[in-house]
Image: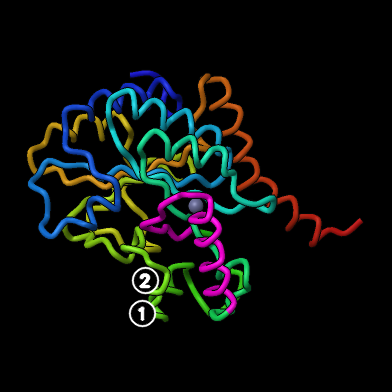
């Protein structure tokens, strides 16, 4: 298998999925009964580098796979060109929301902002059926996760005209969740937020696809996937330095002011 976190590895993985029933999140939630195993739910959380998502959308389309791509609203706004390009390939496009983070935990403001952003996407002709909560450190003590918004305001799904949210609306007793978040593949047999999964790899997941009882819900983060292994190595190392070394330097400077 080509090196993990490269488009070549994603291509090979999609090729293996091409003979299996693969659902978008919306298509899975719209079903009245659980699909027979084996099946896959394919989700991609586009945190940034939206162009990488367009590449991955093209690769999946080559194997006639449909996936759900969730886009964040950046400081400069939504990357509508990238989102339209993915939607034109018949993938599901959804909203990757973080409005409780943005509004420092103010639920009323976060709700208004979420509805505004959904309207903005729909005004661009994009049919948004589902949303995915972005995971980050909370910006206020009033909440733990961005999806708390939907838990606290139960009729918000209806008012936002959404089928569901990618964590709250899934019964994790029926699917095994797999995620490549922070460049580490992890497996969650009974996913719950804040629980650390078991380490795994794309190679092991590929072998799991042949299991007859496989009901796998797989989440890729396109900003971690590149055309060349050298780019993967560069950005992965840079991210590691950012996550481990920079906080250490900050702590050191606070303790030892010049
Ligand atoms: Zn995210």
Depth check: 117 or 124 in front? 124
- 142 relative position to 91: left or right: right
**Ligand 1 has an atom within 8 Å of the beta carbon of the residue at disc 2:** no
Element at badge 1?
Answer: loop
Depth check: 194 or 19 in front? 19
Name above or below for residue 49 compared with residue 112: above
Please count the marks in the image.
2
Q: What percent of the width, then of the height, locates residue 129?
A: 36, 57
Q: Residue furthest right?
A: 258
Q: Which residue is mark 1?
A: 154
Residue 137 seen in the figure? no
Contact, CB < 8 Å: mark 2 with mark 1?
yes
Name above or below for residue 220 compared with residue 71: above
Depth check: 62 or 145 in front? 62
Residue 156 seen in the figure? yes
Name the quadrant containing residue 216: top left
- 183 relative position to 251: left or right: left
Quarter the C terminus occupies = bottom right
Magenta stretch, residue numbers: 109-134
- 17 relative position to 105: left or right: left
Q: Which residue is mark 2?
A: 157
Quarter the N terminus occupies = top left
118 drawn magenta: yes
125 drawn magenta: yes
Name above or below for residue 243 compared with residue 56: below
Element at badge 2?
Answer: helix
Image point (7%, 38%), residue name: 212
């Amino acid at each position: 298998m080509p090196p993990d976190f490269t488009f070549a590895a994603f291509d090979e993985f999609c090729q293996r999925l091409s003979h299996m029933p693969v659902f978008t999140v919306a298509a899975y939630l719209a079903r009245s009964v659980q699909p027979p195993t084996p099946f896959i739910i394919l989700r991609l959380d586009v945190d940034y580098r939206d162009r990488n998502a367009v590449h991955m959308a093209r690769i999946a389309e080559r194997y006639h796979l449909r996936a759900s791509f969730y886009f964040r609203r950046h400081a400069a706004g939504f990357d509508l060109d990238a989102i339209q390009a993915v939607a034109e390939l018949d993938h599901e496009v959804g909203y990757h929301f973080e409005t409780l983070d943005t509004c420092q935990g103010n639920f009323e403001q976060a709700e208004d902002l979420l509805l505004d952003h959904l309207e903005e996407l729909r005004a661009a002709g994009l049919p948004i059926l589902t949303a995915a909560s972005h995971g980050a450190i909370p910006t206020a003590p009033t909440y733990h996760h961005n999806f708390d918004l939907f838990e606290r305001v139960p009729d918000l799904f209806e008012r936002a005209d959404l089928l569901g949210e990618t964590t709250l609306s899934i019964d994790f007793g029926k699917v095994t969740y797999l995620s490549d978040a922070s460049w580490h593949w992890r497996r969650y047999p009974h996913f719950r937020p804040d629980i650390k999964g078991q380490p795994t790899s794309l190679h092991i997941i590929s072998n799991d696809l042949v299991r007859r009882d496989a009901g796998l819900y797989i989440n890729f983060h396109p900003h971690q996937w590149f055309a060349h292994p050298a780019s993967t190595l560069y950005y992965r190392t840079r991210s590691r330095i950012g996550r481990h070394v920079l906080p250490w330097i900050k702590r050191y400077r606070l303790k030892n002011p010049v």
